[in-house]
Image (cartoon, rainbow, N blue to C red):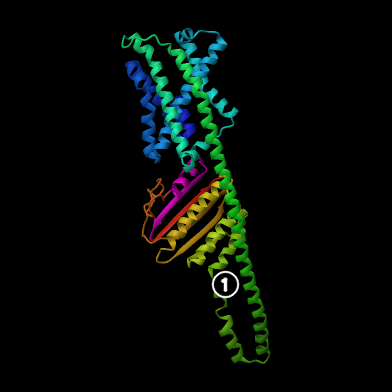
């Protein structure tokens, strides 16, 4: 159960509560039937469970090995540390501890508290693992870390099993297994800590670099948006100036009761004047209702890019609305950026290029819809979120997988994906 809880915490994969109870209970029943099967098979149980989850979550092998061996090693490390601590406090010998069920249970129960206290003391964010295993500049470090985790656990596992083999007459050694197990523990502990701190440092640096990059892009995007609004303002101001002159001419024609002149002015100017302001470039002005500058700048620059590519636009933000508080701003920007980039790329290749952005409030819920036309009549919405699954070529199809990973952390945000009749839609629902 402790191993499963640690695995759940580091991988952010959520087990149902009854699973956390049923799996240990099932293994306990087997242990009652055949102790040796459980003792020697223990090293395989978590890898098998994680492998099943790997296929379900589309994890790569680096993730699989890391989540598996990290959970095993953390359980082993901190159970041994808590055992040493309990032995020191209680002044019991190791033989006395393992000879009493109650004294053996106390270090086991202390394993999780020791682990969480350790994370708190070193100020380590477990989320950095999620970033680290997907980061290209950390993949080599993670792989080396995986090797050290596997070597440590296998060595400790073998040394733990030596007394059992000696008792059954399988081998004869004079090896002081307790001494060597604790020696390996204290040698590996600083190595383990060093890897954790380095991965955390690099992951946080990557996040800070990404935030800075987004800030720079926001400034550029706001500049583009402001220039676009300024251009619309100049166009409207020029239109107003022309209309003032035309109204003067119309007034003169009315006073002279020149019906032919009035009809000529109406047919040449006023009859089609409303069409001038039906262009999608004026729809972008609806983004003024977005109360967050970062989101406004991101969406506006994508829409202007779409407009420059000849894509028909529709923007609906009918009332002032801010970003949802159920998700971090950086995550909102990542998701929207991925959706809009995909929508741009798909719609520009469609027979009728079309892109729509809608954001509105429905009671306490905020809903964001990004819709685009597609070249295909219907897209398989079940497989597009798999890591590396893309029709665009090699090393593609990562964006939607990242969206799935971000949303998996938050139960108050859910995504509905539709595709039919040459239209593809992503609908994000943010609950308060």
- Can you say whether 211 is above or below 271 in the image? above
The residue identified by callout 1 is: 277
Query: Horizontal and vertical percent for residue 324?
Result: 57, 48
Q: Secondary structure at mark 1?
A: loop
Please indicate whether residue 325 sits to the left or right of residue 383 in the image: right
Q: Is residue 267 magenta?
A: no
Q: Is residue 405 magenta?
A: yes
Q: Residue at x 46, y 49 (%)?
A: 399
Can residue 349 be spotted in the picture? yes
Q: Residues within 10 Å of mark 1 (few under 14, many from 20)?
A: few
Front residue of this view, candidates 14 and 172: 172
The total of numbered circles placed on residues is: 1
Query: Horizontal and vertical percent for residue 86?
Result: 54, 14
Front residue of this view, candidates 314 and 106: 106
Front residue of this view, candidates 188 and 293: 188
Can residue 15 be spotted in the picture? no
Per the rendered image, the range of residues in magenta is 398-421
Quadrant in the rendering for residue 4: top left
Which quadrant would the C terminus be assigned to in this image? top right
Query: Horizontal and vertical percent for residue 61?
Result: 39, 37
- Can you say whether 63 is above or below 37 in the image? below
Query: Horizontal and vertical percent for residue 172?
Result: 34, 9
Front residue of this view, candidates 247 and 68: 68
- Can you say whether 349 is above or below 7 in the image? below
């Amino acid at each position: 159960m402790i191993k499963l809880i640690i695995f759940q915490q580091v991988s952010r994969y959520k087990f149902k509560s009854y699973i956390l109870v049923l799996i240990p209970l099932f293994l306990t029943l087997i242990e009652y039937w055949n102790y040796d099967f459980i003792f020697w098979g223990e090293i395989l149980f978590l890898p098998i469970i994680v492998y099943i989850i790997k296929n379900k979550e589309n994890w790569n092998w680096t993730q699989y090995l890391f989540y598996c061996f990290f959970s095993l090693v953390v359980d082993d490390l901190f159970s041994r540390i808590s055992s040493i601590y309990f032995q020191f406090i209680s002044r019991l010998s190791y033989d006395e501890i393992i000879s009493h069920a109650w004294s053996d249970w106390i270090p086991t129960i202390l394993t999780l508290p020791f682990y969480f206290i350790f994370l708190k003391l070193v100020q380590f964010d477990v989320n950095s693992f999620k970033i680290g295993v997907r980061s290209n500049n950390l993949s080599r470090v993670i792989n080396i870390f995986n090797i050290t985790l596997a070597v440590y656990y296998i060595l400790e596992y073998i040394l733990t099993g030596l007394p059992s083999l000696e008792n059954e007459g399988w081998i004869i050694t004079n090896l002081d297994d307790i001494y060597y197990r604790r020696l390996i523990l204290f040698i590996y502990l600083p190595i383990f800590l060093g890897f954790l701190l380095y991965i955390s440092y690099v992951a946080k640096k990557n996040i800070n670099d990404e935030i800075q990059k987004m800030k720079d892009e926001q400034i550029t995007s706001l500049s583009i948006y402001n220039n676009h609004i300024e251009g619309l303002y100049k166009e409207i101001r020029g239109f107003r100036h022309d209309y003032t002159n035309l109204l003067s001419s119309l007034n003169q024609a009315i006073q002279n009761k020149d019906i032919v002149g009035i009809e000529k002015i109406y047919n040449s100017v006023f009859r089609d004047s409303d069409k001038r302001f039906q262009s999608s470039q004026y729809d972008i002005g609806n983004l003024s209702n977005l109360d967050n500058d970062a989101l406004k700048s991101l969406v506006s620059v994508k829409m202007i890019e779409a407009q420059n590519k000849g894509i028909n636009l529709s923007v609906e933000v009918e009332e002032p609305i801010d970003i949802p508080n159920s998700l971090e701003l950086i995550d909102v920007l990542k998701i929207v950026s991925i959706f809009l980039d995909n929508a741009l790329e798909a719609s520009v290749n469609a027979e009728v290029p079309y892109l729509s952005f809608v954001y509105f409030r429905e009671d306490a819920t905020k809903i964001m819809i990004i819709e685009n036309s597609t070249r295909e009549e219907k897209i398989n919405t079940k497989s597009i979120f798999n890591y590396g699954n893309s029709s665009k070529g090699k090393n593609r199809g990562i964006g939607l997988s990242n969206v799935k990973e971000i949303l998996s952390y938050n139960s108050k945000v859910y995504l509905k994906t539709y595709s039919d009749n040459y239209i593809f839609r992503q609908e994000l629902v943010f609950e308060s």
